[in-house]
Image: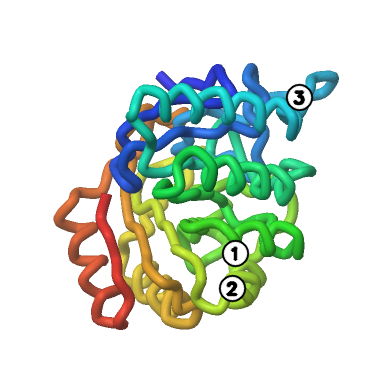
Amino acid sequence: MTALYPDIIYGPVHSRRLGLSLGVNLLPLQSKICSFDCIYCECGWNADNRGRSRFNSRESVREALLEHLRAMAADGALPDVITFAGNGEPTMHPDFEAVIDDTLALRDEFAPSAKVSVLSNATQIGRESVRRALLRVDNNILKLDSAFDATVRVMNNPCGEYSVAQVVENMKLFEGRLVVQTMFLRGEFNGAHFDNTTEREVEAWLALVREIAPQSVMVYSIARDTPCHTLCKVSHEELARIAERVGALGIACSVA
């Protein structure tokens, strides 16, 4: 069963990719807002948000994070990472850059050893303010699930225009200061079969990874409930073989 995050700050939870993670949700608490509507999203499908509050305010996010970090510091149990994810795409927040400024200041005060991470679908990185903010965090993790627009349309269901080629060009603006994250899976949705682990898919994706030249890559498959129930998880062994091919490019790759 998919589920939304009910609070601005959640956790800390043990992330399979990042360690002890204190989550930050900039999106609504009762619904999901995202520029993708991924068939594998643990938060479920996008909602009709007409007439609803869209984003948690910068001030409320800062106050909630301050409260949690202060309490964790008092308990001597600080997080390894402060992670922006939540009920949708965090970089859609209109004050995203200012929220990152606040977060870095609070991190430096209460948990200087903690990393700040942002999990993003990369649809907003054409905006200069978003790029500036992402370049300031420790882990700038950007999604690229396929080299082919048709596969992205099935897996990620972009809301509005989306072009893999344009996203790759925007990723190259980071000059390697990013982490590429890719979900591998296969299945069927609305009568369309897909599998981004085929040789055609992986070879084309590797070519884009080489072009982007990120500091590292994360590959993973589904581990939680998904809104689409006709998906097949990719085995750790298959992911490891893909990771080896990334490693052969001279780029570090982790499997989660």
Q: Nearer the viewer, residue 32 or 6?
A: 6
Label 2 or label 1, whichever lies nearer to me, is 1
Q: Earlier in the sequence, mark 3 or mark 1?
A: 3
- The answer to whether any part of residue 151 appears in the image is no
Q: Position of residue 138 (x, y in %)?
A: 48, 58
Label 3 or label 2, whichever lies nearer to me, is 2
Q: Earlier in the sequence, mark 3 or mark 2?
A: 3
In screen coordinates, is 248 left or right of 122?
Answer: left
Label 3 or label 1, whichever lies nearer to me, is 1
Residue at horizontal 42 percent and vertical 57 percent from the top? 181
Residue holding disc 2: 174
For the N terminus, the image quarter is top left
Instruction: Give residue 11's mark.
Output: none
Callout 1, which amino acid? Leu
Above-or-below relation of 196 to 170: above
Secondary structure of the residue carrying tag 1 is helix
* Whether label 2 touches label 1, CB < 8 Å: yes
Above-or-below relation of 123 to 19: below
Callout 3, which amino acid? Asn
Label 2: few (<14), some (14–19) or many (≥20) C-alpha neighbours in 10 Å: some
Label 3: few (<14), some (14–19) or many (≥20) C-alpha neighbours in 10 Å: few
Residue holding disc 3: 49
Q: Position of residue 186 (x, y in %)?
A: 34, 48
Above-or-below relation of 171 to 231: below
- The answer to whether any part of residue 71 appears in the image is yes
Taking the view exactly as shown, the residue that stands out farthest to the left is: 237
Instruction: Give residue 135's mark.
Output: 1
